[in-house]
Amino acid sequence: MSEPISLPLFADGIHLNQQELIACQAIAKAIPERNNRARANLAGHRGSLIKGRGMEFAEVRHYQSGDDVRTIDWRVTARTGKAHTKLFVEERERPVIILVDLSASLYFGSSLMLQSVQAAHLAAALGWNAIEHGDKIGALISSETEHIELKPRSRQQGILSLISAMAKVHGNQIKQFASRTTDKNHLAEACQRLQRLAKPGSLIWIVSDGYNINDTCIPPLSELKRHCDIGTFLITDPLRQGTKALPKQFRLPVKDAEQERILDRKSYQHWLNGQLSQQNNVAQMLAKLNIETRYIDAAKTLADQMELLR
């Protein structure tokens, strides 16, 4: 019999505090390196596709008016009789922007923690990882009642602003749990805001359960995909995946976003089919935009899902 999985440091699985998000730095340091490169004019310390002044030699071309005379390759110039200049792969800070969905539907958990808590842990780990690589970190935290926009900033300023904002929105959602309203289009509005926030060449992570990703999100995401790299993490729960062991007969109280219901064996199967269908539709929608989707289980710690965080 396997031992029960313990909660991450400082976490209770329901509420969210800054200490547990700061502790996610340890996870970030263990995330394997990605090989992606920026599409446009910015990149992180992994090296960009732009050729300019930097540390790594790229190529030699004919000297052009305005080139820095310090980059002239005198050996090639002497050999060919025409002025040539050296080009280098230029290293720049790459903006990493995380769209954190803290909608009502994520305040659901059947095992280790709420999906919203896992979403915040993942966003913090991705943020810390960006800082580890010298990239700028920005974010957009979205709920039915709040949109917090954080412009990309370097080092501690960027990650601490993200941590503070997530803890604030999560706390407000918990307080308003019984009275909050549902807005099916708030995530589409967040994607539109993301268009203004993300500069070409940015790396964008979307952290969500997919419940509010719909057709209205596609136009802004499609436009963003032209100039940015985008990846999606969908936060799941065993009860919503049909992987949780249940007795033959049960009556299970469930609060799913704005709806409260009692599920028995028959109604649970109908509810589960709807959950899986929604998730599959979202994955297909994103696949058409060539956006990769990964699934993070709220019933496991991030440390136990490291292979998914590349």
Image (tube, helix red, strand yellow):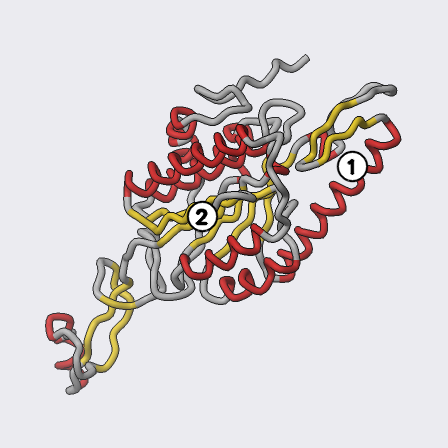
Q: Name the disc covering residue 272, or none.
A: 1
**Horizontal side of residue 154 vs 108, given as left or right:** left
Q: Position of residue 55 (x, y in %)?
A: 22, 58
Q: Residue flagged by tag 2: what amino acid is it?
A: Leu
In this view of the protein, which residue sits in the foreground, 100 or 136?
A: 100
Residue 7: horizontal and vertical position, in percent? 52, 20
**Quick one: SS at disc 2?**
strand
Q: Marks 1 and 2, Cα distance to the nearest angstrom?
A: 30 Å
Tell me the quadrant of the picture where the N terminus can be found.
top right
Choose between 286 and 213: the one closer to the eye.
Answer: 213
Residue 2 horizontal side relative to residue 128, left or right = right
Q: Amino acid at mark 1?
A: Leu
Dot 2: few (<14), some (14–19), or many (≥20) neighbours within 10 Å?
many
Does residue 297 appear in the picture of this structure?
no
Residue 126 seen: yes
- Residue 81 left/right relative to 172: left
Q: Percent from the top left, x then y, of residue 105?
A: 63, 38
Q: Give the residue displayed 76% in from the left and 32% down from the top.
A: 242
Question: Badge 1 local density, few (<14 within 10 Å), some, or many (20+)?
Answer: some
Residue 248 located left or right of residue 43:
right
Q: Secondary structure at mark 1?
A: helix
Work out whether 123 lies above or below 253. Answer: below
Q: Is residue 250 above or below residue 271?
A: above
The residue sitting at 39% across, 24% down in the picture is 19
Disc number for residue 140: 2
